[in-house]
Image (cartoon, helix red, strand yellow):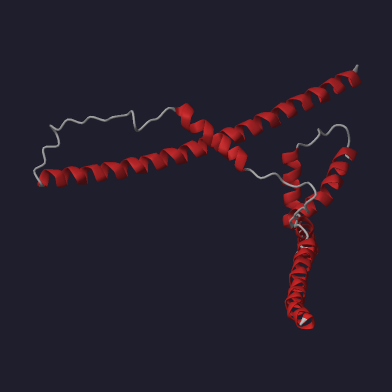
Amino acid sequence: MYSEESEDDISEYHLYRRKYYLLLERCEAIQLENERIVSRLQRVHKLLLKYRKQRSIIIKHLDQHGDNWREASFVLDLRNRHPSDTSVEKPKALKKKAEKPSRDPNAPKRPANPFFQFCQEQRTLLTDTQTKAGPQTNDPSKQEITKELAKKWNALSHDERKIYYDKYEQSKIKYKADIEEYKARSQPSTGSSTVTSTSTSAMSTSTVPTSTTNIVSTPLSGQVDK
């Protein structure tokens, strides 16, 4: 009985712990959204103060010049200012999709930065150690693993980080050589055009002596007949 109750308590504990982390993530997301809204409100408040100040200055200048702006009628034609949404927005969306270039799968990939290389090496080790810790621990999320890897990266010394920076520099050199080779393969070969132009020029030059020979042979044949 005691073991069954303890197992039930443990499972219930893990259940509430999981709910706690989910609620914590939700609270963090709500807090970030609230901060964005507060910053937008502050920006709008500053704009309102700016526009009110500009409005008061304009009204002051109009009053100084004796403009009867308070009794003037204001008519705004909205037909030309607001065209139909269907005729404007849809072509823009299609144009954006058409302008997106397609990536060649055979093209060389850019090298990963030092921190990403460190994460690739340490991610599997970190997950293995957490799974070996026992079945009581819940499976960590990607966000938790990334936070843990960031802590480990910040704890590295200068020499330990230099290893990954050296790997990154070597990868950059290799990527530069690979991309130049890829561009050379992608460009059409100019050998055939060179051969064609050479043969054409040779043919054009070879016809000149032939025509000259014909011109010279004509008067010679005339002299023999005489």
194 to 40, vertically: above or below: below
Q: Relative to the observer, which residue lies in front, 37 or 217?
A: 217
What is the total number of numbered labels drawn onto the structure image? 0
- Residue 62: x and y, percent? 14, 44
Q: Relative to the observer, which residue lies in front, 75 or 36?
A: 75
171 to 122, vertically: above or below: below
Instruction: Residue lying at the far front in this picture: please name it.
Output: 226
Residue under the image location 87 percent in, 43 percent down: 129
- Residue 132 in sight here: yes
Q: Would you say 159 lies left or right of 131 here?
A: left
Residue under the image location 53 percent in, 31 percent down: 90
- Residue 224: x and y, percent? 79, 82
Instruction: Residue lying at the far left in this picture: please name it.
Output: 66
On-image quarter of the N terminus: top right
Q: Would you say 91 lies left or right of 213 here?
A: left
- Residue 9: x and y, percent? 81, 22
Q: Would you say 27 lies left or right of 206 here?
A: left
- Quarter occupied by residue 170: bottom right
- Quarter occupied by residue 176: bottom right
Q: Relative to the observer, which residue lies in front, 25 or 185?
A: 185
Q: Relative to the observer, which residue lies in front, 69 or 190?
A: 190
- Residue 226: x and y, percent? 76, 82
- Quarter occupied by residue 136: top right
178 to 215, vertically: above or below: above
Q: Would you say 97 lies left or right of 36 here?
A: right
- Residue 165 in sight here: no
